């Protein structure tokens, strides 16, 4: 989808100033902040009114926000669902009020998929596969068991479930790669550090690899690794997801090995989808982001081009 902001043709086609309610998860990570900024900037550029709600990582706050958007009769609701389940009732209410709901950055599992219009976001299973493929490539000249610890994202969230699935799917065919510990750290730096400390206490030097479902948790864990007297990216390989600036800084400093990209800059695609949904147009079920993989070797060269 085009992201030119001078005169977005689809915005004129809709022919009115849309009012959009955006139920965001919170501000748990660098990625999420970039995502919020992108949606706000794109709404402003399109001349739309955006009602923004930060749910502070609580599903009940998101449900409340959706109900309030319905009561305010917004034209479109954008939902970044914290977790996959528990949305059936409120999405039915939005459908009954004839307000299209666009999912962004995370998907849902509901009985009636006609209660949401489209999902704008990444292929998280593929991100997990890419992380595992990088690990296989990077360790191909080694022998023996490779012990992996995994920091999972928010329990029950789409990216946590799928990044785990994609990673395990690739490693299944390579039995010397073993996930010896796997626990949630809720996508935050503070918990990433805390859970990594516990992993290090339990497994110590046995750990060869850290796979974190996002860069913030990886960055928190790097601190724990250093405080345990070990060298991140050397004694323990560090793999993250998102490719935020913080990860590039860690890679340039030689403390992180790779970050699998997950693009948060979904604002332009969301505004285009919102205009089309409000105009009653049919949308594809999934508007996918295009993403890459950034190993430490390219970090310094790529850093100036990064937008988040
Ligand atoms: O839904 C995308 C995920 O949510 C990002 O990878 C993570 O950093 C964020 O909090």
Image: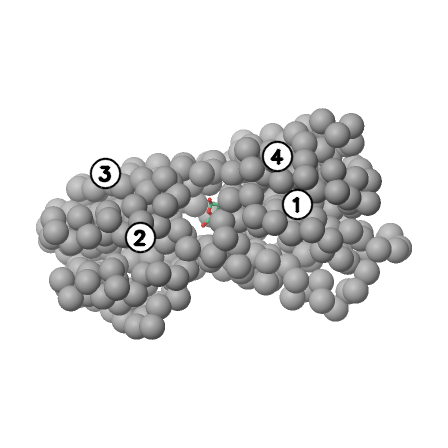
Answer with the quarter of the image where residue 55 lies: top left
Instruction: Name the disc covering residue 59, or none.
Output: none
Q: Is residue 272 visible?
A: no
For the residue carrying disc 4, how many other residues have a C-alpha within 10 Å: few (<14), some (14-19), or many (20+)? Answer: many
The mark that comes first in sequence, 4 or 3, is 3
CB contact under 8 Å: marks 1 and 3: no
Q: Residue at x 21, y 42 (%)?
A: 50
Tell which tag, 4 or 2, sits nearer the viewer.
4
Residue designated by label 1: 239
Answer with the quarter of the image where residue 224 lies: top right
Question: Secondary structure beneath disc 4?
Answer: helix
For the residue carrying disc 1, how many other residues have a C-alpha within 10 Å: few (<14), some (14-19), or many (20+)? Answer: many
Question: Secondary structure beneath disc 2?
Answer: strand
For the residue carrying disc 2, how many other residues have a C-alpha within 10 Å: few (<14), some (14-19), or many (20+)? Answer: many
For the residue carrying disc 3, how many other residues have a C-alpha within 10 Å: few (<14), some (14-19), or many (20+)? Answer: few
Instruction: Name the disc covering residue 44, or none.
Output: 3
Give the mark count: 4
Residue designated by label 4: 193
Tell which tag, 1 or 3, sits nearer the viewer.
1
The mark that comes first in sequence, 1 or 3, is 3
Tell which tag, 2 or 3, sits nearer the viewer.
2
Question: Secondary structure beneath disc 1?
Answer: strand
Q: CA distance from mark 2 to mark 3?
A: 18 Å
Instruction: Name the disc covering residue 79, or none.
Output: 2
The mark that comes first in sequence, 2 or 1, is 2
Answer with the quarter of the image where residue 84 lies: bottom left
């Amino acid at each position: 989808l085009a992201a030119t902001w001078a005169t977005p043709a689809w915005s004129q086609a809709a022919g009115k100033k849309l009012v959009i309610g955006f139920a965001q998860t919170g501000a748990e990570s660098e990625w999420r902040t970039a995502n919020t900024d992108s949606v706000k900037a794109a709404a402003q550029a399109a001349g739309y009114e955006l009602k923004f709600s930060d749910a502070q990582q609580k599903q009940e706050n998101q449900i409340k926000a959706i109900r309030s958007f319905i009561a305010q009769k917004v034209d479109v609701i954008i939902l970044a669902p914290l977790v996959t389940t528990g949305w059936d009732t409120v999405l039915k209410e939005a459908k009954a009020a004839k307000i299209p709901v666009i999912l962004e950055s995370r998907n849902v599992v509901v009985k009636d998929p006609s209660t949401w219009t489209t999902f704008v976001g990444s292929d998280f299973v593929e991100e997990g596969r890419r992380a595992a493929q990088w690990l296989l490539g990077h360790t191909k000249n080694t022998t023996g068991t490779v012990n992996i610890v995994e920091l999972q994202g928010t329990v029950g969230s789409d990216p946590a479930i799928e990044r785990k699935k994609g990673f395990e799917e690739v490693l299944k065919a390579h039995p010397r790669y073993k996930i010896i510990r796997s626990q949630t750290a809720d996508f935050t730096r503070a918990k990433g550090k805390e859970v990594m400390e516990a992993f290090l206490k339990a497994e110590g030097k046995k750990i060869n690899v850290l796979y974190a479902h996002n860069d913030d948790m990886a960055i928190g864990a790097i601190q724990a690794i250093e405080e345990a007297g070990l060298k991140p990216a050397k004694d323990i390989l560090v793999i993250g997801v998102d490719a935020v600036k913080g990860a590039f800084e860690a890679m340039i400093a030689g403390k992180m090995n790779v970050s699998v990209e997950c693009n948060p800059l979904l604002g332009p695609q969301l505004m285009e989808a919102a205009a089309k949904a409000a105009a009653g147009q049919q949308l594809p079920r999934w508007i996918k982001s295009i993403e890459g993989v950034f190993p430490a070797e390219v970090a310094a060269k790529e850093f100036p081009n990064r937008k988040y």
